[in-house]
Amino acid sequence: MHELAITRSLLDLVLEHAARAGGGRVTEVHVAVGEFTDIASESVRFYWDILCAGSPASGACLRFRRVAALFECRDCGARFRPHVGFRCSTCASVRVRLVAGDDLQLEAIDLDSEVAESRHPEPTGPRSAGVPRPHGTDSRCVEDSDCSRNPDSTRLHEETQT
């Protein structure tokens, strides 16, 4: 049930950043979800469709990217992906801490640029807020196949934790 509150916060962030960029219809929302979060993307999608009704984000496609968990050993400093158990893969210590893969981040928002440009014709380049979070070697992407990419969209990048 916590997905409802998370989705509401996500929608608030999306609408806030879309408005800062000049408005327009939101076409896609890109979200990074850590491997060790207990967030069900299907539930977020369900609530998204309900909460977005009548807003500029209505009909926007949610794209989720799974971020793999990464641990750091407190004894030797090695960073590793958990395989079996949570022992350090270098020194076998159990004194480890989770350093990635336990959060949810809004990464980017795609806007229908034709709508945004008709409201604010002055800008010539893409509008951007923040810097995109890089796809590192410790992450794996989960793409949604039911969303078609809109070639007339402007992407806003954001690194915001919810």
Image (spheres, rainbow, N blue to C red):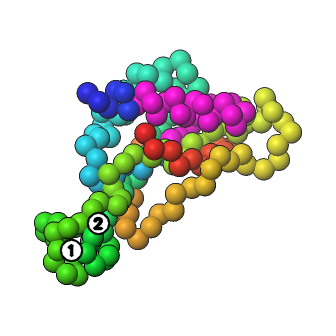
Magenta portion: prevailing SS class: helix
According to the picture, the residue beneath numbered tag 2 turns out to be 71
Give coordinates of residue 7: x percent, y percent. 40, 31
Q: Residue furthest left?
A: 85
Residue 109's image quarter? top right
Residue range of the region highlighted in magenta in the rendering: 7-29
The residue sitting at 37% across, 67% down in the picture is 138
Q: Secondary structure at mark 1?
A: loop
Quadrant where the image shows the N terminus: top left
Question: In the image, 108: left or right of 105?
Answer: right
Give coordinates of residue 67: x percent, y percent. 36, 57
Residue 6 visible:
yes
The residue sitting at 72% across, 33% down in the picture is 22
Question: In the image, 114: left or right of 91?
Answer: right
- Was residue 30 drawn as part of the magenta stretch in this picture? no
Q: Are marks 2 and 1 in contact (CB under 8 Å)?
A: yes
Question: In the image, 118: left or right of 140?
Answer: right
Residue 62's image quarter? top left
The residue sitting at 44% across, 67% down in the picture is 136
According to the picture, the residue beneath numbered tag 1 turns out to be 88
Is 136 drawn above or below residue 77 in the view shown?
A: above
- Was residue 28 drawn as part of the magenta stretch in this picture? yes
Q: Disc 1 residue type? A: Cys
